[in-house]
Image (spheres, grey):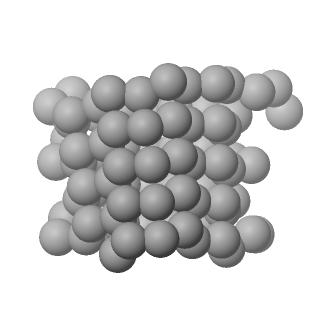
Amino acid sequence: VKGNIEIKGFSLFIGPSGRLKGDVLAQNVKVRGRMKGQINVKGGVEITQEANFSGEINSKSVLVEKGAYFDALVKLGRG
């Protein structure tokens, strides 16, 4: 998918074969596939070991599993 995704109040899951180039606005995001863009969430972000992520993250928490490709600017808020 190329483009932005806005699903306020809901979580987004990008599966192992999923590809996203764009920005995301959601409650939580879990990435198992590939994503390039910006993630803005009210909750948390999880980048799994098979994921490939590059971009920016604005959230309350970020979990990156060992083995993931992760190239990001991260801004953590309080809440």
Residue 15: name its quadrant: bottom left
Query: Above or below — where is 20 with respect to 7?
Result: above
> x, y (%) of residue 2?
38, 71
79 horizontally vs 63: left or right: right
> x, y (%) of residue 29?
52, 56
> x, y (%) of residue 77?
76, 27
Residue 31: name its quadrant: bottom left
44 horizontally vs 65: left or right: right
Q: Who's the residue at 19% across and 65% down the image?
A: 16
Residue 17 visible, this orientation: yes
Residue 10 visible, this orientation: no
Residue 25: name its quadrant: bottom right
42 horizontally vs 11: left or right: right
Q: Who's the residue at 60% across and 44% down the image?
A: 44
Outermost residue on the front side: it is 3
> x, y (%) of residue 45?
52, 44
Q: Which quadrant is the C terminus positioned in?
A: top right
Q: Who's the residue at 66% across and 38% down the image?
A: 59
Q: Nearer the viewer, residue 16 or 74?
A: 74
Q: Which quadrant is the N terminus positioned in?
A: bottom left
Outermost residue on the right side: it is 79
Q: Who's the residue at 37% across and 60% down the image?
A: 21
Q: How many marks?
A: 0
Query: Above or below — where is 18 with respect to 27?
Result: below
Query: Above or below — where is 58 with respect to 72?
Result: below
